Amino acid sequence: MDAKDQEEKVSALPGEVEEFEGSREKAGRSLTTTAILGFIIVAIIYFYAQTMIGFLAVVIRGKAAAGTSNPRETVTQLLTARALFTKPIILYSVIFSQFIFLLLPTIWLVRRWHTKHVFTYVRFRKTPPFQIILALVGGILFYPVSAGIGNFLMDELHFPDFLAKIGSLVFTSNKPSQLLLVIAVVCVTPAICEETLFRGYVQRTLERSLGPKSIIVAGILFGLYHMRPLDLVSLSLFGMLIGYFVYRSKSLLPSMTAHFAYNLVAVLSLYKSTNGSSTTPLASLHIPLVIMLLSAAGTVVVVLLYRIVTKDKNRLRVATVEYSP
């Protein structure tokens, strides 16, 4: 059995047969290049669509922006359409754009370049409940670590407060009805669409050529994708964390769960801090060092437990490789 066959066996569950009849598979193209190229294509499509949506939002709200007395607020609105996310129609458009311009192109790439068995390829399959619970806890525990890193960088770099508001406006909600809509946009939608792209496609494809190193590469691409310099480190680390869950479980569900939980903590923390009409930017919610350290320790425990509960499955997978004819 040659090296390529062994890679395919390692990436699939025992007894599972995958047929790679896609164009780039038949042409023998580099899997690493294919994964990165696919990410670039989908990202361009999505961000171009989001730019158009943001432009239309600015045009629609142009009269309101023109009357502002603070020039920096107008710049904020022009920098990102997130400054206008208080309008439900904009929130709905984000759901639409993620599913249409992020998820669908990812599915198309899988079918075109790799295989028609999309769900099998992205590993959308059942996994034991305890693994889901651990991923949920891991996503929650890592949030204070992520926020602490962002706060530290903001203080050290003297990041302007009015720019920090850009990243928090999408999380802002002042009443239960708004909260439910924000949860649908910020928590549910990315958990499905972004995880299908990054862990389902990018990491899955990289894993076939890079093995465990794919976790690092996909995590960094995940951080870069969000285009938030202060959050690059924390989001990359979070991407690696949930990528590890997928690598060990060979299922997309744990990363979806952790991604949902992580974003939910962010949304709920900001919702509690709004207190009616007042709004506190998410980036300014300083996390005490002791909480950050405890959360980091808890995350490490979750990772170790996850390794233990997935040990038998991975041993069986290796045995399948070693004893396959």
Image: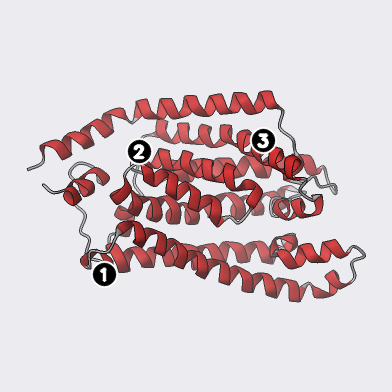
Instruction: Tell me, yes or no, if residue 201 can be seen here.
Output: yes
The image quadrant that residue 264 belongs to is top right
Question: Residue at the location (11% across, 47% down)?
Answer: 1
Q: Would you say 159 lies left or right of 312 here? A: right
For marks 3 and 1 on the same chain, the one whose residue lies earlier in the sequence: 1
Q: Which residue is under mark 3?
A: 148
The residues bearing labels 1 and 2 have C-alpha atoms spaced at a distance of 28 Å
Question: Residue at the location (70% across, 63% down)?
Answer: 80
Q: Residue 249: give its label.
A: 2
Q: Residue furthest front?
A: 157
In the displayed structure, 186 sits above or below 127; it is below
Residue type, mark 1 in image: Ser
Q: Secondary structure at mark 1?
A: helix
The residues bearing labels 2 and 3 have C-alpha atoms spaced at a distance of 29 Å
Q: Residue furthest right?
A: 69
Residue type, mark 3 in image: Gly
Q: Secondary structure at mark 2?
A: helix
Name the front one of labels 1 and 2: 1
Q: Which residue is under mark 1?
A: 23
Q: In x, y percent, where is residue 18?
A: 21, 54
Q: In x, y percent, where is residue 34?
A: 35, 62
Image quarter hosting the C terminus: top left
In the displayed structure, 96 sits above or below 322; it is below
Q: In x, y percent, where is residue 147?
A: 66, 38
Residue type, mark 2 in image: Ser
Q: In x, y percent, where is residue 158?
A: 78, 45
In the displayed structure, 81 sits above or below 289; it is below
